[in-house]
Amino acid sequence: MASATAVSSSISSGSLLSRESKAALLNSVKRPEVCVAPVAPRRRRMLARPCRAVEPTKRNESVVPAAAVVEAAGATVEEEEAAVTQSAVDYEELGKELEDASPLEIMDRALEMFGNEIAIAFSGAEDVALIEYAKLTGRPFRVFSLDTGRLNPETYHFFDAVEKHYNIRIEYMFPESGEVQALVRSKGLFSFYEDGHQECCRVRKVRPLRRMLKGLRAWITGQRKDQSPGTRASIPVVQVDPVFEGVDGLGSLIKWNPVANVDGTDIWTFLRTMNVPINSLHSEVNFSYTNWTARSY
Protein backbone atom coordinates (compact mmCIF):
# COMPACT_ATOMS: atom_id res chain seq x y z
CA MET A 1 0.00 0.00 0.00
CA ALA A 2 3.07 2.33 0.53
CA SER A 3 3.81 2.31 -3.16
CA ALA A 4 0.21 3.25 -3.93
CA THR A 5 0.45 6.16 -1.43
CA ALA A 6 3.68 7.34 -2.96
CA VAL A 7 2.15 7.22 -6.38
CA SER A 8 -0.81 9.23 -5.22
CA SER A 9 1.42 11.80 -3.50
CA SER A 10 3.62 12.23 -6.48
CA ILE A 11 0.62 12.67 -8.74
CA SER A 12 -1.14 15.09 -6.41
CA SER A 13 2.01 17.12 -5.83
CA GLY A 14 1.90 18.13 -9.41
CA SER A 15 5.24 16.50 -10.39
CA LEU A 16 5.69 16.59 -14.07
CA LEU A 17 5.86 13.04 -15.32
CA SER A 18 5.60 11.80 -18.80
CA ARG A 19 2.49 9.84 -19.83
CA GLU A 20 4.65 6.75 -20.13
CA SER A 21 6.10 7.21 -16.65
CA LYS A 22 2.63 7.58 -15.10
CA ALA A 23 1.40 4.46 -16.81
CA ALA A 24 4.45 2.52 -15.56
CA LEU A 25 3.85 3.68 -11.99
CA LEU A 26 0.14 2.75 -12.03
CA ASN A 27 0.81 -0.68 -13.46
CA SER A 28 3.33 -1.33 -10.71
CA VAL A 29 0.54 -1.25 -8.06
CA LYS A 30 -0.68 -4.74 -7.11
CA ARG A 31 -4.42 -5.11 -7.15
CA PRO A 32 -5.96 -7.39 -4.53
CA GLU A 33 -7.06 -10.74 -5.83
CA VAL A 34 -10.77 -11.50 -5.50
CA CYS A 35 -11.87 -15.10 -5.50
CA VAL A 36 -15.18 -15.58 -7.27
CA ALA A 37 -16.93 -18.94 -7.05
CA PRO A 38 -18.23 -20.23 -10.36
CA VAL A 39 -21.99 -19.72 -10.74
CA ALA A 40 -24.02 -22.52 -12.16
CA PRO A 41 -26.19 -21.50 -15.08
CA ARG A 42 -29.80 -20.76 -13.94
CA ARG A 43 -32.61 -22.77 -15.42
CA ARG A 44 -35.30 -20.75 -17.10
CA ARG A 45 -38.71 -21.19 -15.48
CA MET A 46 -41.58 -22.14 -17.72
CA LEU A 47 -44.24 -19.47 -17.62
CA ALA A 48 -46.69 -21.68 -19.43
CA ARG A 49 -47.20 -25.41 -19.57
CA PRO A 50 -46.09 -27.15 -22.70
CA CYS A 51 -48.84 -27.68 -25.20
CA ARG A 52 -50.15 -31.20 -25.45
CA ALA A 53 -52.64 -32.62 -27.85
CA VAL A 54 -55.81 -33.44 -25.91
CA GLU A 55 -59.21 -34.57 -26.95
CA PRO A 56 -61.84 -31.85 -26.87
CA THR A 57 -63.96 -32.01 -23.73
CA LYS A 58 -67.55 -33.02 -24.16
CA ARG A 59 -70.33 -30.68 -23.08
CA ASN A 60 -71.85 -31.68 -19.77
CA GLU A 61 -75.48 -32.17 -20.66
CA SER A 62 -76.40 -32.53 -16.99
CA VAL A 63 -75.62 -28.90 -16.15
CA VAL A 64 -79.10 -27.58 -16.94
CA PRO A 65 -80.96 -30.45 -15.27
CA ALA A 66 -78.73 -30.08 -12.23
CA ALA A 67 -79.56 -26.39 -12.03
CA ALA A 68 -83.24 -27.24 -12.30
CA VAL A 69 -82.87 -29.77 -9.48
CA VAL A 70 -81.23 -27.14 -7.28
CA GLU A 71 -84.00 -24.66 -8.04
CA ALA A 72 -86.65 -27.28 -7.37
CA ALA A 73 -84.95 -28.20 -4.13
CA GLY A 74 -85.02 -24.54 -3.11
CA ALA A 75 -88.70 -24.35 -3.91
CA THR A 76 -89.31 -27.52 -1.88
CA VAL A 77 -87.54 -26.01 1.12
CA GLU A 78 -89.68 -22.89 0.88
CA GLU A 79 -92.84 -24.99 0.65
CA GLU A 80 -91.79 -27.02 3.69
CA GLU A 81 -91.08 -23.86 5.68
CA ALA A 82 -94.48 -22.46 4.69
CA ALA A 83 -96.12 -25.73 5.72
CA VAL A 84 -94.44 -25.57 9.14
CA THR A 85 -95.64 -21.99 9.59
CA GLN A 86 -99.19 -22.93 8.59
CA SER A 87 -99.26 -25.92 10.93
CA ALA A 88 -98.27 -23.68 13.83
CA VAL A 89 -101.36 -21.49 13.40
CA ASP A 90 -104.23 -21.86 15.87
CA TYR A 91 -107.10 -21.73 13.38
CA GLU A 92 -109.77 -21.59 16.04
CA GLU A 93 -108.21 -18.40 17.38
CA LEU A 94 -107.69 -17.08 13.86
CA GLY A 95 -111.37 -17.68 13.16
CA LYS A 96 -112.32 -15.61 16.20
CA GLU A 97 -109.93 -12.87 15.10
CA LEU A 98 -111.53 -12.73 11.63
CA GLU A 99 -115.13 -13.19 12.73
CA ASP A 100 -115.99 -9.54 12.07
CA ALA A 101 -113.65 -9.11 9.11
CA SER A 102 -115.00 -8.39 5.63
CA PRO A 103 -115.01 -11.10 2.95
CA LEU A 104 -112.25 -9.22 1.16
CA GLU A 105 -110.05 -9.18 4.26
CA ILE A 106 -110.62 -12.89 4.86
CA MET A 107 -109.88 -13.72 1.22
CA ASP A 108 -106.70 -11.67 1.32
CA ARG A 109 -105.49 -13.46 4.46
CA ALA A 110 -106.21 -16.87 2.94
CA LEU A 111 -104.34 -16.15 -0.30
CA GLU A 112 -101.47 -14.55 1.58
CA MET A 113 -101.01 -17.56 3.83
CA PHE A 114 -101.32 -20.35 1.26
CA GLY A 115 -100.38 -18.87 -2.13
CA ASN A 116 -100.55 -21.50 -4.86
CA GLU A 117 -101.56 -24.26 -2.43
CA ILE A 118 -105.11 -22.96 -2.02
CA ALA A 119 -107.96 -22.89 -4.55
CA ILE A 120 -111.48 -21.51 -4.79
CA ALA A 121 -114.28 -24.05 -5.17
CA PHE A 122 -116.66 -22.65 -7.79
CA SER A 123 -120.06 -24.31 -8.26
CA GLY A 124 -121.30 -22.04 -11.04
CA ALA A 125 -123.69 -20.16 -8.78
CA GLU A 126 -123.48 -16.95 -6.73
CA ASP A 127 -120.13 -18.13 -5.35
CA VAL A 128 -118.67 -16.27 -8.34
CA ALA A 129 -118.44 -13.55 -5.68
CA LEU A 130 -115.42 -15.42 -4.32
CA ILE A 131 -113.60 -14.97 -7.62
CA GLU A 132 -114.42 -11.26 -7.58
CA TYR A 133 -113.05 -10.91 -4.04
CA ALA A 134 -109.91 -12.81 -5.03
CA LYS A 135 -109.40 -10.49 -7.97
CA LEU A 136 -109.80 -7.44 -5.73
CA THR A 137 -106.96 -8.61 -3.48
CA GLY A 138 -104.55 -8.27 -6.38
CA ARG A 139 -103.02 -11.66 -5.53
CA PRO A 140 -102.78 -14.67 -7.87
CA PHE A 141 -105.44 -17.30 -7.27
CA ARG A 142 -106.69 -20.67 -8.50
CA VAL A 143 -110.26 -21.77 -9.21
CA PHE A 144 -111.61 -25.29 -9.61
CA SER A 145 -115.03 -26.71 -10.38
CA LEU A 146 -116.69 -30.12 -10.51
CA ASP A 147 -118.11 -31.05 -13.88
CA THR A 148 -120.55 -33.82 -13.01
CA GLY A 149 -121.51 -34.40 -16.62
CA ARG A 150 -125.06 -33.38 -15.76
CA LEU A 151 -124.77 -29.59 -15.73
CA ASN A 152 -127.16 -27.32 -17.60
CA PRO A 153 -126.03 -25.69 -20.86
CA GLU A 154 -126.46 -22.30 -19.17
CA THR A 155 -123.90 -23.30 -16.57
CA TYR A 156 -121.31 -24.22 -19.18
CA HIS A 157 -121.86 -20.85 -20.87
CA PHE A 158 -121.49 -19.22 -17.47
CA PHE A 159 -118.16 -20.98 -16.87
CA ASP A 160 -116.92 -19.69 -20.22
CA ALA A 161 -118.06 -16.14 -19.43
CA VAL A 162 -116.29 -16.24 -16.04
CA GLU A 163 -113.04 -17.45 -17.58
CA LYS A 164 -113.08 -14.66 -20.14
CA HIS A 165 -114.15 -11.97 -17.67
CA TYR A 166 -111.32 -12.76 -15.22
CA ASN A 167 -108.82 -14.06 -17.78
CA ILE A 168 -108.41 -17.33 -15.88
CA ARG A 169 -108.61 -21.05 -16.56
CA ILE A 170 -110.88 -23.02 -14.28
CA GLU A 171 -109.44 -26.37 -13.17
CA TYR A 172 -112.25 -28.80 -13.94
CA MET A 173 -112.53 -32.11 -12.10
CA PHE A 174 -114.44 -34.97 -13.69
CA PRO A 175 -115.82 -38.23 -12.28
CA GLU A 176 -114.15 -41.50 -13.20
CA SER A 177 -115.74 -42.70 -16.43
CA GLY A 178 -115.78 -46.33 -15.31
CA GLU A 179 -117.73 -45.48 -12.15
CA VAL A 180 -120.25 -43.38 -14.06
CA GLN A 181 -120.69 -46.11 -16.64
CA ALA A 182 -121.32 -48.74 -13.97
CA LEU A 183 -123.79 -46.48 -12.14
CA VAL A 184 -125.81 -45.64 -15.23
CA ARG A 185 -125.86 -49.22 -16.50
CA SER A 186 -127.09 -50.55 -13.18
CA LYS A 187 -129.46 -47.77 -12.07
CA GLY A 188 -130.23 -45.66 -15.12
CA LEU A 189 -129.71 -41.96 -15.88
CA PHE A 190 -132.03 -40.57 -13.18
CA SER A 191 -131.31 -42.73 -10.16
CA PHE A 192 -130.71 -39.61 -8.06
CA TYR A 193 -134.49 -39.00 -8.03
CA GLU A 194 -134.95 -42.35 -6.28
CA ASP A 195 -132.00 -42.80 -3.90
CA GLY A 196 -131.73 -39.27 -2.52
CA HIS A 197 -128.66 -38.40 -4.60
CA GLN A 198 -126.41 -40.47 -2.34
CA GLU A 199 -124.71 -42.80 -4.80
CA CYS A 200 -124.83 -40.39 -7.71
CA CYS A 201 -123.32 -37.60 -5.60
CA ARG A 202 -120.61 -39.90 -4.36
CA VAL A 203 -119.55 -40.85 -7.89
CA ARG A 204 -120.02 -37.53 -9.65
CA LYS A 205 -119.11 -35.03 -6.92
CA VAL A 206 -117.58 -36.34 -3.71
CA ARG A 207 -114.83 -38.51 -5.17
CA PRO A 208 -113.67 -35.92 -7.75
CA LEU A 209 -113.66 -33.33 -4.96
CA ARG A 210 -111.54 -35.58 -2.77
CA ARG A 211 -109.02 -36.01 -5.59
CA MET A 212 -108.73 -32.28 -6.02
CA LEU A 213 -108.38 -31.49 -2.33
CA LYS A 214 -105.69 -34.14 -1.84
CA GLY A 215 -103.34 -31.87 -3.76
CA LEU A 216 -104.06 -28.75 -1.69
CA ARG A 217 -103.32 -27.39 1.75
CA ALA A 218 -106.42 -25.20 1.85
CA TRP A 219 -109.59 -24.44 -0.10
CA ILE A 220 -112.12 -21.62 -0.23
CA THR A 221 -115.86 -22.22 -0.30
CA GLY A 222 -118.93 -20.05 -0.73
CA GLN A 223 -120.77 -21.59 2.22
CA ARG A 224 -122.91 -19.18 4.23
CA LYS A 225 -124.79 -19.48 7.50
CA ASP A 226 -128.07 -18.39 5.91
CA GLN A 227 -128.02 -21.16 3.31
CA SER A 228 -129.01 -23.82 5.82
CA PRO A 229 -129.71 -22.61 9.37
CA GLY A 230 -129.92 -26.19 10.55
CA THR A 231 -126.48 -27.35 9.40
CA ARG A 232 -124.43 -24.21 8.71
CA ALA A 233 -125.57 -21.80 11.40
CA SER A 234 -122.25 -22.04 13.22
CA ILE A 235 -119.89 -22.31 10.27
CA PRO A 236 -116.65 -20.37 11.02
CA VAL A 237 -114.79 -18.19 8.52
CA VAL A 238 -111.79 -20.53 8.77
CA GLN A 239 -111.37 -24.00 10.22
CA VAL A 240 -109.46 -27.25 9.98
CA ASP A 241 -111.56 -29.27 7.56
CA PRO A 242 -113.27 -32.04 9.56
CA VAL A 243 -114.18 -34.15 6.52
CA PHE A 244 -111.71 -33.93 3.65
CA GLU A 245 -108.00 -34.66 3.48
CA GLY A 246 -105.32 -32.30 2.25
CA VAL A 247 -101.89 -32.99 0.85
CA ASP A 248 -100.65 -34.11 4.28
CA GLY A 249 -103.62 -36.30 5.13
CA LEU A 250 -106.66 -35.94 7.36
CA GLY A 251 -106.54 -32.92 9.63
CA SER A 252 -104.12 -31.02 7.39
CA LEU A 253 -106.62 -29.29 5.10
CA ILE A 254 -107.75 -25.76 5.99
CA LYS A 255 -111.20 -24.63 4.91
CA TRP A 256 -111.92 -20.93 4.39
CA ASN A 257 -115.47 -19.53 4.22
CA PRO A 258 -115.06 -15.79 3.52
CA VAL A 259 -118.80 -15.14 3.03
CA ALA A 260 -119.97 -17.23 6.00
CA ASN A 261 -121.44 -14.20 7.73
CA VAL A 262 -122.82 -12.50 4.62
CA ASP A 263 -126.52 -12.54 3.82
CA GLY A 264 -127.53 -13.89 0.42
CA THR A 265 -129.23 -10.61 -0.50
CA ASP A 266 -126.00 -8.75 0.15
CA ILE A 267 -124.13 -11.20 -2.07
CA TRP A 268 -126.43 -10.45 -4.98
CA THR A 269 -126.19 -6.72 -4.38
CA PHE A 270 -122.41 -7.05 -4.50
CA LEU A 271 -122.50 -9.05 -7.76
CA ARG A 272 -124.70 -6.53 -9.52
CA THR A 273 -122.73 -3.57 -8.20
CA MET A 274 -119.47 -5.05 -9.46
CA ASN A 275 -121.06 -6.06 -12.80
CA VAL A 276 -119.97 -9.65 -12.33
CA PRO A 277 -121.12 -12.36 -14.79
CA ILE A 278 -124.20 -14.20 -13.49
CA ASN A 279 -125.63 -17.56 -14.45
CA SER A 280 -128.76 -16.95 -16.54
CA LEU A 281 -130.60 -19.62 -14.53
CA HIS A 282 -130.74 -17.17 -11.64
CA SER A 283 -133.91 -15.29 -12.45
CA GLU A 284 -134.56 -14.31 -8.85
CA VAL A 285 -132.30 -12.76 -6.24
CA ASN A 286 -133.38 -15.24 -3.56
CA PHE A 287 -132.71 -18.32 -5.67
CA SER A 288 -131.51 -20.73 -2.99
CA TYR A 289 -128.28 -22.69 -2.97
CA THR A 290 -130.17 -25.94 -2.39
CA ASN A 291 -132.44 -25.46 -5.40
CA TRP A 292 -129.46 -24.49 -7.51
CA THR A 293 -127.59 -27.64 -6.52
CA ALA A 294 -130.51 -29.82 -7.54
CA ARG A 295 -131.11 -28.06 -10.85
CA SER A 296 -127.44 -27.94 -11.83
CA TYR A 297 -126.97 -31.63 -11.33
Image (cartoon, rainbow, N blue to C red):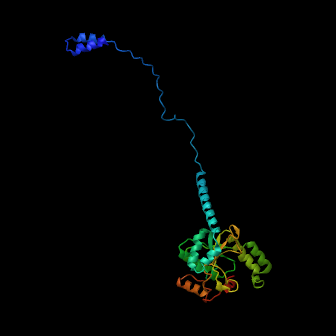
Is 16 situated left or right of 2 in this image?
left
Q: Is residue 75 above or below residue 295?
A: above
Residue 143 in the image: state x and y as whole percent. Answer: 61, 74
Residue 15 in the image: state x and y as whole percent. Answer: 20, 12
- Snapshot quadrant of residue 253: bottom right
Which image quarter holds the N terminus? top left
Is 297 situated left or right of 60 in this image?
right
Q: Is residue 45 above or below residue 157?
A: above
- Snapshot quadrant of residue 108: bottom right
Q: Is residue 167 above or below residue 4?
A: below
Residue 93 in the image: state x and y as whole percent. Answer: 63, 75
Is 101 situated left or right of 27 in this image?
right
Report if residue 199 is visible in the image: yes
Task: Please name the residue shown 75% across and 82% down the image.
Answer: 197
Residue 216 in the image: state x and y as whole percent. Answer: 65, 69
- Snapshot quadrant of residue 204: bottom right
Question: 111 or 135: nearer the eye?
Answer: 111
The number of callouts visible is 0
Is 237 situated left or right of 185 in this image?
left
Task: Please name the residue shown 80% across and 78% down the image.
Answer: 186
| Residue sticking out furthest to the right | 186
Task: Please name the residue shown 65% across and 68% down the image.
Answer: 87
